[in-house]
Amino acid sequence: MSMQWQVIASVDETKRSRDLVSGGRESTPSARPIVYISREQSIQHKLRNSVVALSLVGSASENVPLYASVKVYSQQSALFSKDKRFPEKLNTRQVESGSGKLCDVVVSNLLWWELQHQQRQQQEHTSGAPREFHEDYAMPIGSAPIIVHAKLALYQINDIGNATQLTVVPATFNNHTRPPPKGAAIAQSLSGSVVSLNGWISYRSPYGTQTFQIIDISTTSGDLPSVGIMSEATSIQIQPSTISRSGSSGTLVSKSEWIGGIKGVVGGYDDLLSEIVDHLYGYLEDAVSSIHKTDVPSCFQTPMKGIMISGRPGTGKSVLASSLAEHSGLPYTVINCPDVFQTNAGASEDYLRSAFSSLLAKSKASIVLLDEVDMIASARSSRKGVEAKLFATLLHLVDSINMHPSGNKIFIIALTNRLHAVDSSLVRSGRLDKVYDLHLKGVDQRLGALRILSKDLPMDSSKREEYLRKVAKVTHGFVPTDLQALCVDCALALISQMAAGQPTAVVDMSYFDRALKTIRPSGMGEFLSKIPTVTFDDLYGIQDAIADLKVSIIEPFHNPGKYIDLGISPPRGVIVHGPPGVGKTMLCCALAEELGINFMLVESSQIRSKIVGESEKNIARMFAQAKANAPCILFIDQIDVLAPSRGSTNTSENSGDRIVTGLLTEMDGFFTGSAGKSAQVDVLVLAATNRPEVIDSAILRPGRLDQIVHIPVPDEKSRQAILEGYMNKMPIRITPNEIQTLTRATEGYSGADLENLCREAALICLRQDITNTEITLAHLESAKLVSKPSLLGYEDQHLFSR
């Protein structure tokens, strides 16, 4: 039996469930195809708990019905009671031709969206992608009703078989930056829903609503194999879909248009971007021309398969790769490699094969993005079970593409932040033969990224470039995501100002200065430590050491041209040595503050480990992290613990010598590559020790720690400068002659001892009378009885006289 229904409104059937579930989490049921009819219709035609087939009247779409479950309409229901769109009662009227009745019905938003999709197909005579579905996609108020043909009492719910397996593809309008959901989560959310071949399902995840089309279905029913009821046991396989640029015919754009489109989205990588496009364009152009002109032989005897883009997290690999694919004018697909792993045996390999085969079947030349490829292409020793099968499938697919000169071509762009973990058999000639490393290094690169990231920030147009350049100069080691966080912080501060009654406020340099106090380079990790905020002006009695550091480190950083003119390069490593308490560590911290670049403070005890081999790994990680955050000062305190003379320790594993060898190897690989090429030092190794005699001599040779700064035991002149420096900060009543007398009486005192002497004098002053406001010479004399010299009789030795 069949009749005509008139759709008068649509409803979000998930609203009530979202109200009941706190926060609308993933457990909230997703949208389902439902039609609400009057109670009279339900009783008359026995439609309770049944499934109906709907299609537009008078269209070819009647051959592709939409299946929906039936529910009884009640205006007192929470779904309808608070909305004036819904009538008190659904009416039934006689059709003018007298051939039947026309009944009013209400449908769910998803079913309304599917009907709209069918209507657009009918009007446009195309199967193009529909508009995006979301829960708020409802029938507008005042819209003309849609008349549908309903095949009634098709089957009772209990008579329809269960859907055992679904194969779905994401809708082309889905946001492909969202991770695809797991099939089990979709099945749980849509349990009890009616699904059919070529129908649509909608899943509401924490990342938003995602829509999928069913391209294959298996059910337990033999009478109606294309319709089934979802259950939690339904297996759902998600296949990747092909994405085409809007309005694109799949034709490769010109090189200038390609590069220009990417530069509007990605900043700071102009040179690398041009290099990648230059490398890809010849192959892509040859592939397109060899397809259209079969009589023209290919220019390349060895087919090009793809490239690898690596870089630490936050450098913009995914954005760059997506922009490369999107602005090329060619179809592309995105495969998030962690989501390739499926529950069923063999499903993971089928997922990969389907992604490649769908592009080969539909497109003449296309691009595949493999994000986080290290998940399925890890080193051979760590692969087991499914991982080994996936990697073998990937290699087979890479080897099989682009072999026929006139066949369809696929070009791979693989992404990873763990290049060391990728099997070398994938990154070689004939497969992914080119590796590009993303590294945002230098002021100009950061400025380019900031121009893109801050384009929506309201700033004074005449000073925008000045502000951005100042920020670029002080954000050493920042990756694009760090710069984005900086801009977001400024935007939030601006919103707060506007909410406080300043509607015309704009972002200026003060906003960036405040944000820079809290946002630091994310790559510093475990070695980012709080260092004292101290400058050279806060250090007393070590002016000769400060002068040495200014000439050897600060001047090359600010004026590299002077060293190039003389044909020399500045030192790559500096060691500061002297007795305990003379200010070695504070001097190195002040150097970082004066330069304003990244500073990694590493205690040698952090690196050494009792586990064999762990110390060498820590050393390699320390140098790699310093290089990634260049320009950077790598300060190794107490280096004598890390690099004692080889042969001085005896252990069964010979761990001490192995640590020194690892340190020497890292320093050689660190400095040799760039030595002599420029005066700019990306990473400066700064070491401090009070036991230079125990350090291995190979560390101190030219080319490693070749600049030696010695801080001796303070002499009378230095002690007077130290005392005057501390006393200027304290309320002390003392004459210059008394200072000289005190200076002569503090022989053997280090800088730390003299600071402690002044502090003890202040404490004695307070103990005598809490109301005292001045410290006198008597208090200092009393403090001398408590604070003893630590360097009395110390035999200081310069490294050169060793």
Image (cartoon, grey):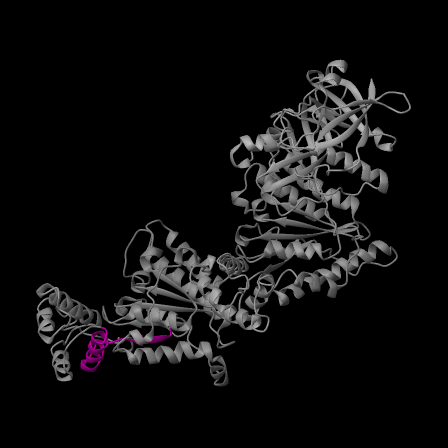
Q: Is residue 656 above or below residue 701?
A: above
- Residue 99 in the image: state x and y as whole percent: 89, 20
Q: Residue at x 10, y 63 (%)?
A: 767
User: Taking the image as drawn, is residue 645 in sight?
Assistant: no
Q: How many marks?
A: 0
- Residue 762 in the image: state x and y as whole percent: 15, 68
Instruction: Work out whether residue 767 or residue 249 is closer to the camera in this orientation and state it.
Output: 767
* Image position of 607 (left or right of 412): left
Instruction: Work out whether residue 678 or residue 672 is closer to the camera in this orientation and state it.
Output: 678
- Residue 129 in the image: state x and y as whole percent: 76, 43
Instruction: Check the picture and name the quadrant holding the N terminus.
Output: top right
* Image position of 552 (left or right of 330): left
Q: Residue at x 59, y 66 (%)?
A: 451
Instruction: Work out whether residue 416 or residue 542 is closer to the camera in this orientation and state it.
Output: 542
User: Taking the image as drawn, is residue 230 in sight?
Assistant: yes
Instruction: Work out whether residue 223 or residue 730 is closer to the camera in this orientation and state it.
Output: 730
The answer to which quarter of the image holds residue 128 is top right
- Residue 16 in the image: state x and y as whole percent: 59, 30
The answer to which quarter of the image holds residue 276 is bottom right
Instruction: Check the picture and name the quadrant holding the C terminus.
Output: bottom left
Q: Is residue 676 magenta?
A: no
Q: Which residues lie in the magenta part?
A: 706-729
* Image position of 513 (left or right of 430): left
